[in-house]
Amino acid sequence: MANASEWFLGHLKRGGSFLVVGGIGFVVDAVVYNALVFWGGHGPLFALPLVGKIIAIAIASVVTYFGSRLWTYRDRADAQTLRSFLVFALLNVIAILLQLGCLGFSRYVLHLDSPLADNVSGTLIGQGVATIFRYFAYGKFVFKDDKEGAAEAVAEIV
């Protein structure tokens, strides 16, 4: 039973730090998107909301990469290489597509183009779906599990 509780505590701590890093990324995403699309009523990318969302997510992704690397997955000793950053970028492209799907559905299927509609569909719902995807994908493919590093992280908790 100790292994199950260690597993749970490890995911609780990692999940908490992941959510804090993601929350910061969420704020960056929302601020950049709203500035690009709705600044002064109709921002410079009002007619191109998907482009605005791509730019916002790209900027937020840089922030979350460093937050994940330096805090959430710091116990994973695997040296971060160009390869791991490229995998991170690829996973973020998939996450961007998930968010764009939510925003695009709202804009082009439901014909909702208000700031509230865009923020609910593209930022809240899209970000939620993408966050769940990222948590599992980053842990499996980018910041791979190092058994010794994971044991050290659990020891920090207990």
Image (tube, rainbow, N blue to C red):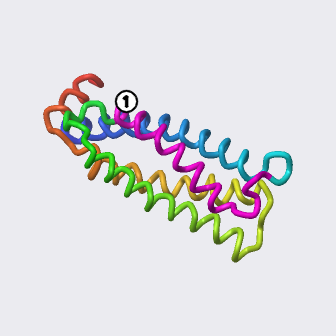
Q: Position of residue 93 (x, y in %)?
A: 44, 59
Q: Residue furthest bottom?
A: 109
Q: Secondary structure at mark 1?
A: helix
Total label count?
Answer: 1
* Image location (x, y in percent) of residue 29: 60, 45
The reply to whether the magenta stretch includes residue 29 is no
Quadrant containing the C terminus in the rendered view: top left
Q: Is residue 50 magenta?
A: yes
Rendered position, 67 above or below 134: above
Q: Main secondary structure of the magenta part?
A: helix
> Residue at 41% across / 52% down in the picture?
134
Depth order, front residue of 30/136: 30
Quarter of the image for the N terminus: give it: top left
Q: Residue furthest right?
A: 41
Classify 147 as above or below 98. above
Classed neighbour count for the residue bearing mark 1: other residues with Cα under 10 Å, few (<14), some (14–19), many (≥20): some
43 displayed left or right of 66: right
Residue at the spot of label 1: 71
What x and y, as percent, mark residue 100?
58, 64
| Residue drawn where x is 27% and y is 51% of the image | 140
Quick check: 6 left or right of 106? left
Of all residues shown, which one is farthest toward the left?
148
Question: Which amino acid type corresponds to the residue marked 1 in the rendered image?
Answer: Trp
Could you tell whether 31 is left or right of 21 in the image? Answer: right
Asked if 12 appears above or below 93 in the picture, the reply is: above
Residue located 43% across and 54% down the image: 92
Q: For this rendering, which residue is in front, 15 or 106?
A: 106
Q: Where does the magenta region start and end?
A: 43-72
Coordinates of residue 50 in the picture (x, y in percent): 63, 62
Residue placed at 35% from the left, 52% from the top? 136
